[in-house]
Image (tube, grey):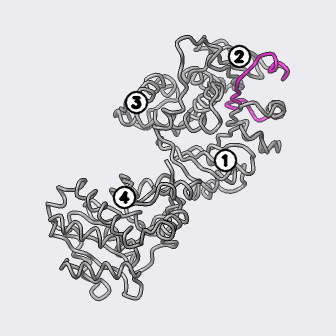
Amino acid sequence: MRLATVDQSKKIDENSQKNYGLSGEILMECAGALAAREVDQSYFPELSRGEVGVVCGPGNNGGDGFVLARHLHSAGHRDLTIYIVGSKEQRSPLCQLQIQRIEQHGLRAIFLEDTPEKLERLRSSKLVIDALFGIGLNRPIEAPFVKVVDLINSLKVPVVSLDTPSGLDCDRGAATGAVVQADMTITFGLAKPGFFVGEGPYHVGKLRILPIGFPLENLRNIATTHFLFNEKLARRYLPTRKESSNKSDHGRLAVVAGRAGMWGAGLLASSSAYRMGSGYVHWLSFEPHLSEVMAQPEILTGQLQTLSQLNEVDYSAFAVGPGLGVSQKTADLIEFLKADKDRAVVVDADAITTCVQFDLFPLPAQWVITPHAGELSRVLKVSSQEIEMDRYHSVLQAAEKTGCHVLLKGYRSVVGYQNRCMVIHSGNAALAKAGSGDVLTGMIGSLLGQGLDTLQATAAAAYIHGRMADEWVRSGKDKSSLMPTDIADSLPGLLGRISGGAIL
């Protein structure tokens, strides 16, 4: 699903008016009317229970709110009060036009510029519509608007934001000041990248995306950098099996991982690769494997004594790093694999740190590294806090520096390469446990070995990995109780539901 940054959203709006003859007034009327219908359908009990408060700012977002109020009033919801925030000098022309129209329709309106104490009336509302500021706000909300946001957030009633929760940075998902805490956000045209990362999900609530007439060609030509990866895409990319196929048709993955004290990392990566459908999984390490860790007899094991051994088997993909150790041996392995630029490789954990310490970047373009924010901070030489403040920018920076695809793990995981980002629409804090990343590495390696390209394999594996955690919590289990082995063991059922289209 395409996402539109703030600049792209503005350009979509401008192009729709300039090249397709859709005036700003028409687009605003469509936005407000469709939003009113969505509110009517989603919050009818609240609408019929008491007063509805519509808080409108001085810009075009406020104009959307006026249109919504007018259409709710026409639909029979007469117990409605509009709160107009900001001075007359601050109002956009379309906002001023819509104020004239609500006055003509006789709607109850309070101009807070003249009587700010009347904002207290909002406390009696059973539903609040936030149309204070839209996506164009590029600075923290200032006084006197902060007081309005604080009051909205203090109410124990549903809050619906139009286009975006007022105050949210729609590109980064950052909340640098006061931000409305919405129960539902109704956005227009396309969703915004910041809705899915950082603090965005906590402020957006339920998301509704309404088409208000932007031409499809316009959306596709402009919104080309940010995308959302969801179940529909995962279902499209998951490999299928013919009944006549055999194990050689489903990839031969080499997992180079594990050492004394860290054998579990290799075991988790290898077993999850089998669960994802690999025909063969070879678990290799620089040290001889201990027999007592071999809980999965299907896994082929071996000690990697010389790198030339890797040429003796026709591996379709490699997964390198979990528990392997940061050493010259690991560096030599990565350099050896780089020599064949056609190899598909996923690099994780100790292998990422080795690339940093031994200055092994750039890597081949079809490779993928899978750092969390701490590991990526060593790659970019910035703090993890700075990375979390703008996950999209950070992952694109990393992709440029490393030369390959980058999966920045966390809430929410983002895949980046060549100025394009894909945010993974699944996952929660249940995955915050040692070993979860090892499972993901095996899953990505498996899909690479089965022939998916790097972006498809990485995004599909990350989505399924996160979806497993979502279903764990949805079924009533506590977030803190999920074990990495639970992810691999539960993959069969989840894969069956996704490929069959069933949703838990």
Up-down relation of residue 474 to residue 217 (above or below): above
From the image, tell me which residue sits under label 4: 185
* Residue at the disc numbered 1: 417
Q: The disc labelled 4 sits on which kind of residue?
A: Thr
Secondary structure under the numbered disc 2 in the rendered image: loop
Mark 4 vs 2: CB contact within 8 A:
no
Q: Nearer the viewer, mark 4 or mark 2?
A: 4
Q: Quick one: SS at disc 1? A: strand
- Residue 346: name its quadrant: top right
Give 274 or 416, whichever is nearer the viewer.
416
Instruction: State the image coordinates of residue 307 (x, y, percent, origin top left).
Output: 84, 23
> 250 or 117, which lies in front?
250
Which stretch did the figure color magenta? 306-328
Residue 475, percent from left and from top = 35, 32
Mark 1–mark 4 Cα distance, whole angstroms, equals 29 Å
What's the amino acid at mark 1? Tyr
Q: Earlier in the sequence, mark 1 or mark 3?
A: 1
Is residue 271 visible in this depiction of the protein?
yes
Residue 360 position in % (x across, y down): 81, 42
Q: How far apart are marks 3 and 4 (CA)?
A: 27 Å
